[in-house]
Image: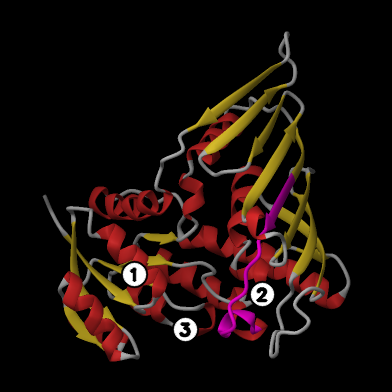
């Protein structure tokens, strides 16, 4: 079996989660780790093996990688995707892929130009319930979709770059983007966005510039309407994302990416089906999808072009709230 040489740009917490998961994939060989803090890269290499670099550009030039995992905070993204693609290295990049759509589109163009594989860390697309919903929609089981709703409510705050809007983009762009990605993947392109957001709950946190509550209305190209709310000030016991889709023939509800409730609206007698595969590791499946795509020369489920699409919707929501008007896509 061919083993792919894998490297990392950034050796923080999310990189640790990926490395631990990848260590269970036999077709992966850890080749190199890079971080501006050399000791972090050295720590990873001591556990998984591989070379240590402080400069990721030097790593991409010398390490002869097949795949690179880009695990940087949003504000730190620059030209790493473009340089990796130019060197023939396939890419796994965490979300959001950028904080502006221009850079995101440059990433997508580079991946297409050099023909490398890419995967964005929207691993919830691999949830069993989300997959089931996608198959039902693609088979036209729902009939016409009229409404989609979602909520990402949690009690969460990090007093670092995360609360600085210029570095994270805010909750919608950095965190609840997972929910937006699911809804856009299932319901299709968005043509117009209107949003309200504010900081109402964490008023005592110094240097905090992100929103802690938001409400967003989406108009899909299909004509359907979407409504998404998010907050980082909810009860600690409500963490998670929930979504529903109303079709004429079927309504879908999910409170867990691996579970789906299917309401068959036009069948007699009325029937509700519970679909679940609760122990599916979605992050591992997203990683494996990229590894297999490289080995089998096929497409991934969530290439960078999809990361651009989701980012554009969330950036449009931020722009709408800032300017107090609906925003038409594309940006």
Do tag 1 and tag 2 residues touch (Cβ < 8 Å)?
no
Instruction: Report the residue at 23% width, 54% height from top.
Output: 24
> Is 97 within the magenta?
no
Do tag 3 and tag 1 residues touch (Cβ < 8 Å)?
no
Image coordinates for residue 288, horizontal then vertical, percent: 31, 51
- Tell which circle, 3 or 1, labels the residue nearer the N-terminal end: 1
Label 3: how many residues lie within 10 Å, few (<14), some (14-19) or many (20+)? few
Front label number (3 vs 2): 2
Q: On the image, numbered disc 2 is attached to which residue? A: 170
Q: Over which residues does the magenta segment extend? A: 149-164
Where does the C terminus fall, quadrant-wise?
A: bottom right
Quadrant for residue 206, please give it: bottom right
Marks 3/2: CA–CA distance: 19 Å
The answer to whether any part of residue 64 appears in the image is no
Instruction: Report the residue at 77% width, 27% height from top.
Output: 248
Front label number (1 vs 2): 1
Q: Mark 2 falls on what kind of element?
A: loop
Q: Which mark is residue 78?
A: 3
Instruction: Report the residue at 68% width, 65% height from top.
Output: 314
Marks 3/1: CA–CA distance: 22 Å
The answer to whether any part of residue 291 appears in the image is yes
Q: On the image, numbered disc 1 is attached to which residue? A: 16
Instruction: Report the residue at 29% width, 69% height from top.
Output: 89
């Amino acid at each position: 079996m061919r083993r792919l040489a894998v490297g990392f740009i950034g050796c923080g917490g999310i990189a640790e989660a990926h490395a631990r998961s990848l260590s269970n994939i036999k077709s992966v060989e850890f080749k190199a780790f890079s971080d501006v803090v050399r000791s972090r890269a050295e720590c990873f290499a001591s556990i998984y093996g591989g070379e240590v670099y402080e400069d990721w550009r030097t790593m991409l030039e010398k390490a002869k990688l097949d795949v690179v995992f880009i695990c940087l905070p949003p504000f730190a993204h620059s030209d790493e995707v473009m340089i990796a693609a130019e060197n023939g290295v396939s890419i796994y990049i965490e979300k959001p892929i950028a904080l502006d759509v221009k850079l995101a589109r440059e990433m997508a163009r580079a991946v297409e130009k050099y023909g490398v594989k890419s995967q964005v860390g929207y691993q919830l697309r691999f949830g069993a319930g989300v997959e089931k919903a996608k198959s039902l929609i693609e088979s036209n089981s729902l009939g016409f979709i009229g409404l989609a709703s979602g909520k990402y409510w949690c009690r969460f705050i990090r007093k670092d770059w995360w609360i600085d809007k210029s570095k994270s983009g805010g909750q919608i762009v950095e965190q609840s983007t997972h929910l937006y990605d699911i809804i856009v993947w299932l319901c299709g392109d968005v043509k117009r966005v209107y949003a309200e957001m504010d900081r109402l709950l964490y008023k005592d946190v110094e240097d905090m510039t992100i929103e802690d509550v938001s409400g967003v209305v989406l108009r899909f190209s299909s004509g359907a309407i979407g409504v998404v709310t998010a907050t980082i000030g909810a009860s600690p016991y409500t963490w998670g994302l929930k979504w529903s889709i109303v079709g004429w023939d079927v309504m879908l509800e999910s409170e867990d990416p691996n579970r789906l409730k299917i309401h068959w609206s036009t069948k007699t007698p009325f029937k509700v089906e519970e679909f679940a595969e609760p122990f599916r590791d979605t992050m591992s499946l997203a990683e494996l999808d990229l590894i297999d795509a490289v080995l089998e020369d096929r497409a991934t489920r969530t290439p960078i072009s999809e990361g651009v699409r989701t980012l554009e919707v969330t950036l449009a929501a931020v722009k709408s709230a800032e300017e107090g008007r609906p925003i038409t896509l594309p940006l």
